[in-house]
Image (tube, grey):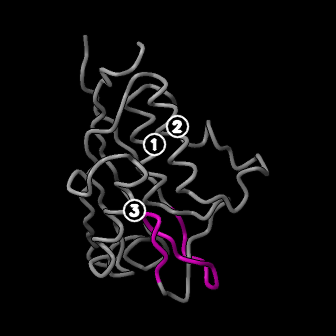
Amino acid sequence: MNDFRIGQGIDFHRFEPGRRLVLGGVEFNEPYGLTGHSDADVVLHAVADAVLGAVGLGDIGMHFPDTDSRWKNADSRELLREVVALASEEGWKVGNADVTVIGQQPKIAVHRGEMEHSIADILGVSPGNVNVKATTTEAMGFLGREEGLATLAIVMMVRNRQANR
């Protein structure tokens, strides 16, 4: 029996002036946000894809397609909660998550603790089981030109012994 699974998720969104910037369920005070069908929380989207990938349930676009008006301006915290519930139905719970935000701006360190607590709350783990960090691209490529943000997330899922599976 396989008691652990690892999943990875990656997401990219362009900056858009005048939109809210939400990362890891935390609103940043910036003059720009990210373009997307939902609130475009690139962090939570990557985490959701990592959870879905680990348990073999496809990807976020399959569950919340941008062609479906129900998900227009959706709160990505709710999307991730639904993903965690789907994983739980399959007998899995989150063990830990490691998240890297990639881009020149905004500075993540100011909100790192708040982001870790927000993500942990959604995933149903302690904040110590979530690590958020950031890196730049040393001004290379579209991320270096500050055209958007990317996030890479890795999640370990653990077989839920309490589940009826």
Q: Residue furthest right?
A: 69
Which numbered dot is residue 59? 2
Find out whether residue 63 is within the magenta segment: no
Amino acid type, mark 1: Asp
Disc 1/disc 2 C-alpha distance (Å): 5 Å
Quarter of the image where the C terminus is located: top left
Q: Residue at x 26, y 57 (%)?
A: 127
Q: Residue at x 45, y 22 (%)?
A: 90
Q: Residue furthest left?
A: 128
Contact? badges 1 and 2 (CB < 8 Å)? yes
Q: Could you tell whether 16 is left or right of 70 in the image?
A: left
**Above or below: residue 165 compared with residue 153:** above
- Residue 26: horizontal and vertical position, in percent? 45, 71
Q: Would you identify the image quadrant in which residue 37 lies?
A: bottom right
Between disc 1 and disc 2, whose residue precedes?
1
Count of numbered tags: 3
**Residue for badge 3:** 118
**Residue for badge 1:** 49
Which residue occupies the foreground of this view, 146 or 44? 44
Between disc 3 and disc 2, whose residue precedes?
2
Please report the bounds of the magenta region as a residue range. 13-28
Disc 3/disc 2 C-alpha distance (Å): 21 Å
